[in-house]
Image: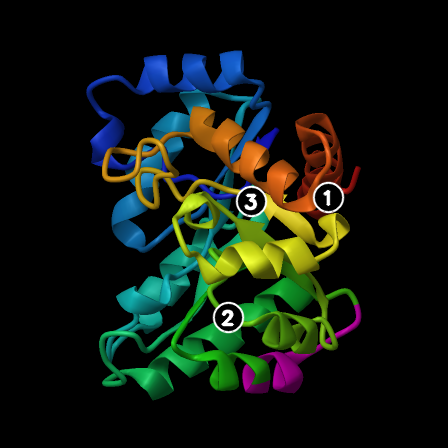
Amino acid sequence: MIDTHVHLYDSAFDPDRDQVVERAKKAGVTHCILPAIDKSAYGAMQECLETYSGFCYKASGLHPTSVKADYNPELGFAYSKMTGAVAIGEIGLDFYWSREYAGEQISAFEQQLEWAKDLDLPVIIHSRSAFGELLASLKKCAFPGMRGVLHAWSGSREVFEQAGRYGNFFMGIGGVVTFKNARLAEIVRETNLDRIVLETDAPWLTPVPYRGKRNESSYLSYIVQKIALLKDISPDQVIGQTTENALSLFFGK
């Protein structure tokens, strides 16, 4: 299994990070992608990359909720940390709480999509309450070879399919799919497995039966079980295809 989105460097893991990694490996996790948020993330992220080399891999980018009026220094810092990155992320648009910096978010997102073109890297996209603007930016910035993950997908299947017109995108599925009455469950049921990758977004978005507690990569197994149930296939089939998807996207394998 590959956790395509985990913030292992977050302080929530400071008390027992080694044990968290060991539990993940014991559960069958082979790779973890660590997306950045802003400048504050990189010190702890680098420690994780060095301590868990060959298990943790970095993405570099500026999270939309960290975009303010003067975002260019943050953006420049993210670009300076691109060496060794397997993706650009997490980037995107988030108007859930406020549209105060909507213009800045769109500009920062589109600049980072240009990086993806220049550096030939996949993107990890965060999109919340901004699906129209997301599609507009993807259309504007589309290029041959555009690819990535629509992380923690909360939009419709139709919007996901529209995004697919502009690039080779996978749906990032995490703990929300296990929640009772989750609309996402029906979307996952209808989406081909070759379009899905696994993620936790740990320490957040913890799956049932641990909802409300700290999330971790070992809990991918609960997400796998739910996807298998929804699709009436074996957990091994889910693991095999989603692992193949992630290896192809992030590592060119």
Q: Is residue 18 left or right of residue 90?
A: left
Is 142 one of the magenta-colored residues? yes
Residue topped by disc 2: 155
Q: Residue at x 62, y 70 (%)?
A: 157
Residue topped by disc 3: 85
Residue 240 vertical placement versus 184 (above, below): above
Q: Which residues are magenta?
A: 136-144
Residue 187 vertical placement versus 98 (above, below): above
Secondary structure predominantly adopted by residues drawn in magenta: helix
The label nearer to you, 3 versus 1, is: 1
Residue topped by disc 1: 245
* N-terminal-most mark, 3 or 2: 3
Q: Is residue 238 left or right of residue 150?
A: right
Real-space Cα separation, disc 2 to disc 1, in angstroms: 21 Å
Which residue type carries mark 1?
A: Asn
* N-terminal-most mark, 2 or 1: 2
Residue 67 locus on image (x, y percent): 30, 71
